[in-house]
């Protein structure tokens, strides 16, 4: 039954491909087949026909590490509000990635996300173009090992399991060691600002450095990134203030995960707490990562570790007992800490004396967008 379905689908798409030239959004597939940078020009030209989009940006914790020998990944995903047809195939998204190896660009990838099983798409391409796509051993990728113009040898078929549904990434792989370096356009440059969902952070680096330094500039940066955090849900908590505990706290839950530095931010919390019997102001970002993972992120980005829970020091000196010069990265403030929140979540926090800090906590409702504004 599945073979009959694949054959019928292949016949349908073969008829669609048989047209002498692609027009409109169909040009996207034509441009993708060759795996040439001209694809991005076609994407820009056809942008208006693709409808509203949402975006998700992600990078691994080591992508911008102080240590230049680390590996990393920058990933951008665009989802279309309404799938559109390209040569008979239902396109539901666009993906692109940049891979870093030992601190240098290693490869680039760009793809159309298609609502069809990868084995079915492989069969369609083999029937139409004379390719020989076969699934690679112990892999979710299909590779073509024969010359079959206009399909580039760099065009790969890969299974995608978004939300538990098997679909296909039809992607081009560009390796720097083979084709030299290239400029991969930012998704915001290709599509413009997303009409749906939240915005990607404009400057996640600046946001996190302000938090690590416990600078009041952090609050202004949060306000400026309002579209990235979305319309938050505010809740208030209060306690007796006995012992080392908050007297009052306000929590802002984000409507969706906010990605920064390879971390997943879920909420913001601020309030007044009691430490050693004295009130202190605190503000925190709540993450999905546990404290151990967060400590590694801080080390990647600053070159500092906090082995005794009190002082951030040069990680190389700590590991090897060396008297190293100060690294280029900004060391976290002594008032900054990594701790465990509820449900094993991690907290990135600043805590300063309430009476002599010269800092006042802003109204949380003024920091973020809410359902009322």
Image: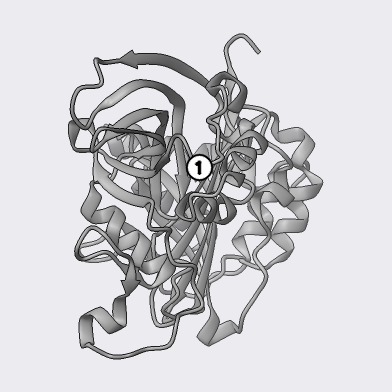
Question: Residue 148 is drawn in which quadrant?
Answer: bottom right
Residue 87 locus on image (x, y percent): 62, 41
User: Mark 1 highlights which residue?
Assistant: 357
Furthest-top residue in this view: 372
Furthest-right residue in this view: 45
In the image, 264: left or right of 370?
A: left
Residue 288 locus on image (x, y percent): 30, 40
Q: Residue, x 21% and y 32% (percent of image)?
A: 244
Question: Which residue is more in the foreground, 50 or 308?
Answer: 308
In the image, 298: left or right of 259?
A: left
Q: Residue, x 45% and y 82% (percent of image)?
A: 326
Q: How is the image coloured?
A: one colour
Residue 241 in view in this figure: yes
Question: Which residue is more in the foreground, 60 or 322?
Answer: 322
Q: Is residue 262 above or below residue 288?
A: below
Question: Residue 346 is drawn in which quadrant?
Answer: top left
Q: How many marks?
A: 1
In the image, 329: left or right of 34?
A: left
Asked which secondary structure carries label 1, the reply is: loop
Q: Is residue 238 above or below residue 55?
A: above
Q: Split into 4 quadrants, where in the image is the C terminus? A: top right
Q: Split into 4 quadrants, where in the image is the N terminus? A: top left
Residue 82 in view in this figure: no
In the image, 369: left or right of 122?
A: right
């Amino acid at each position: 039954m599945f073979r009959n379905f694949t054959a019928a689908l292949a016949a349908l798409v073969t008829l669609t491909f048989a047209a002498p030239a692609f027009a409109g959004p169909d040009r996207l597939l034509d441009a993708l087949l060759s795996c040439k940078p001209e694809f991005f020009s076609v994407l820009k030209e056809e942008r208006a026909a693709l409808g509203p989009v949402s975006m998700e940006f992600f990078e691994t914790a080591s992508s911008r590490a102080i240590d230049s020998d680390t590996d990393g990944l920058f990933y951008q995903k665009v989802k279309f509000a309404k799938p559109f047809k390209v040569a008979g195939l239902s396109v539901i998204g666009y993906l692109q990635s940049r891979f870093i190896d030992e601190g240098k660009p290693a490869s680039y990838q760009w793809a159309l996300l298609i609502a069809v099983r990868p084995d079915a798409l492989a069969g369609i391409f083999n029937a139409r173009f004379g390719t020989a796509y076969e699934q690679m051993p112990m892999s979710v990728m299909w590779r073509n090992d024969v010359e079959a113009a206009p399909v580039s040898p760099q065009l790969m078929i890969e299974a995608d399991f978004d939300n538990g549904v098997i679909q296909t990434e039809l992607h081009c792989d560009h390796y720097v060691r083979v084709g030299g370096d290239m400029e991969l356009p930012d998704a915001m440059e290709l599509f413009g600002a997303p009409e749906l969902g939240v915005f990607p952070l404009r400057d996640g680096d600046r946001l996190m450095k302000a938090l690590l330094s416990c600078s009041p500039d952090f609050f202004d940066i949060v306000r400026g990134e309002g579209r990235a955090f979305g319309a938050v849900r505010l809740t208030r908590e209060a306690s007796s203030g006995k012992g080392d505990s908050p007297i009052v706290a306000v929590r802002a839950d984000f409507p969706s995960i906010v990605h920064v530095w390879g971390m997943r931010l879920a909420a913001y919390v601020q309030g007044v707490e009691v430490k050693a019997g004295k009130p202190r102001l605190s503000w925190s970002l709540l993450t999905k990562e546990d404290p151990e993972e967060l400590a590694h992120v801080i080390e990647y980005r600053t070159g500092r570790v906090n082995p005794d829970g009190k002082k951030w020091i040069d990680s190389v000196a700590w590991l090897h007992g060396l008297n190293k010069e100060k690294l280029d990265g900004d060391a976290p403030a002594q008032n900054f800490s990594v701790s465990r929140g509820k449900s094993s979540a991690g907290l990135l926090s600043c805590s300063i004396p309430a009476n002599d800090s010269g800092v006042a906590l802003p109204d949380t409702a003024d920091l973020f967008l809410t359902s009322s504004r």
